[in-house]
């Protein structure tokens, strides 16, 4: 099921306090990046954050579930209306995530 573009943009806007937010559309769903690091997925109009220790420590409610069938569990983030909370969660999670490997030419 494809994501609603308004929902995708809302999530990106809510995360904007963490850094430069970009999106990449993949098969009707989206990967979401902050300062070049992929930190989550938006699938079926739900936001999923890569699990990290830093993210876990800030979560108001921890709920792990796969964003799509066959995927590893991610933190499911239902509380999207608190921009400061979401930006902080994304920023701290990204601090723990590695930079992507350079693409081969």
Image (cartoon, grey):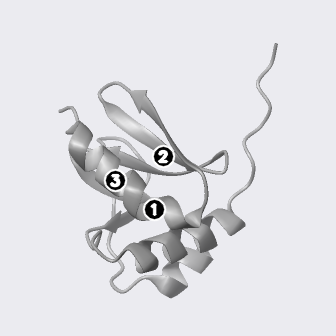
Look at the numbered disc 2 and give the secondary structure of its residue. strand
Examine the rendering and report whether any part of residue 73 can be seen.
no
Looking at the rendered structure, which numbered label has been put on residue 66? 3
Q: Nearer the viewer, mark 3 or mark 2?
A: 2
Residue at horizontal 25%, vertical 69%?
A: 78
Q: Which residue corresponds to mark 2?
A: 32
Does residue 43 appear anywhere in the picture?
Answer: yes
Look at discs 1 and 3 and give the one toward the viewer. Answer: 1
Classify residue 101 as left or right of residue 57: right
Q: Residue at x 30, y 43 (%)?
A: 68
The answer for how far apart the CA atoms under marks 3 and 2 are is: 16 Å
Q: Secondary structure at mark 1?
A: helix
Counting from the top left corner in percent of width and height, residue 96 is at 69, 67
Residue 77 is drawn in which quadrant?
bottom left
Circle 1 is placed at which residue position? Answer: 15
- Under circle 3, the secondary element is loop
């Amino acid at each position: 099921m494809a994501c609603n573009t308004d929902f995708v943009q809302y999530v990106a806007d809510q995360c904007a306090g963490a850094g430069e937010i970009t999106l990449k559309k993949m098969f009707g769903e989206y990967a979401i990046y902050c300062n070049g690091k992929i930190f989550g997925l938006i699938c079926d109009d739900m936001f999923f954050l890569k699990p990290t220790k830093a993210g876990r420590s800030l979560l108001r409610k921890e709920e792990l579930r796969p964003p799509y069938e066959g995927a590893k569990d991610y933190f499911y983030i239902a509380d999207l209306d608190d921009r400061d909370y979401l930006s902080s969660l994304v920023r701290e999670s990204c601090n723990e995530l590695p930079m992507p490997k350079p693409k081969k030419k």
